[in-house]
Amino acid sequence: MWIFIAIVFYYAYRFIQLLIKMKQDIVLPVTTDELASIRKEPRKTVKSPTYTSQKAGIILYALVLTSIIGMFILILQFQHDFVLMLYFLFMIPVIDMSNFLNLFAVTKDGILCGARFASWKSIKSFEFVRIDVKHNYYGVSREINDQYELRIKTRFNTLTCIVTTEEMKGKLGDLMGEENVKAE
């Protein structure tokens, strides 16, 4: 039970942190051309890092979190061993909650990617991986073939986005270099 509570609080904390960081000045992408050259998913470009453009994802994320908390409260009412095993069943939606927000942005404090925020201190390394015939995304969309996937390694996970122009690759590489992130 305590593991479940810790996981829910962790995701709620990350979500609140992301909402706070979205208020900061965005370093990149700021123009529509820059937005068009970054993708979180292969088939669609990222949305602007504002509350209005991310409204649907924010609402969906909040609804999933509140429904999980509501189910947890209901389960506490029935305290049977079988019902206690349902905790982990309710955690399944949490696994893919990062994709609710189609977001990638660089702020002065770090990087917003999906429903995650990675501070510059937590980023260990980054690399640009060519999307060639051997890559998983190759063939999904013509715009991303022979382009790059940016992989940002943090302490606990890896953040990714697709970069569709050489200019954006250079800007992201320069920003990461300015923050002394080690390139692989």
Image (cartoon, rainbow, N blue to C red):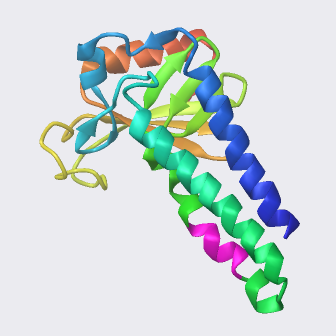
Q: Quadrant of the N terminus?
A: bottom right
Q: Residue at x 59, y 28 (%)?
A: 19
Read off the magenta span: 86-92
Residue lying at the far left of the rendered structure: 142
Q: Quadrant of the C terminus?
A: top right
Q: Which quadrant holds residue 55?
A: top left
**Measured along the vertical axis of the image, is residue 128 above or below residue 178?**
below
| Residue 89 within the segment the image draws in magenta | yes
Q: Is residue 99 left or right of residue 118?
A: left
Type of secondary structure dominating the magenta stretch: helix
Q: Is residue 116 left or right of residue 145?
A: right
Q: Which quadrant holds residue 24?
A: top right
**Measured along the vertical axis of the image, is residue 107 above or below residue 137?**
above
| Residue 91 within the segment the image draws in magenta | yes
Task: Find residue 18 and report its horizontal and vertical position in percent.
Answer: 61, 30
Task: Find residue 166 and report its horizontal and vertical position in percent.
Answer: 26, 20
Q: How many marks?
A: 0
Task: Find residue 135 and report its horizontal and vertical position in percent.
Answer: 30, 52
Task: For residue 13, say whether it is visible.
Answer: yes
Q: Residue at x 67, y 39 (%)?
A: 14
| 72 or 5, nearer to the observer | 72
Q: Residue at x 16, y 46 (%)?
A: 141
Task: Find residue 63 and report its horizontal and vertical position in percent.
Answer: 54, 51
| 78 or 50, nearer to the observer | 78
Q: Residue at x 27, y 55 (%)?
A: 134
| 75 or 162, nearer to the observer | 75
Task: For residue 181, say whether it is visible.
Answer: no
Q: Which quadrant holds residue 30?
A: top left
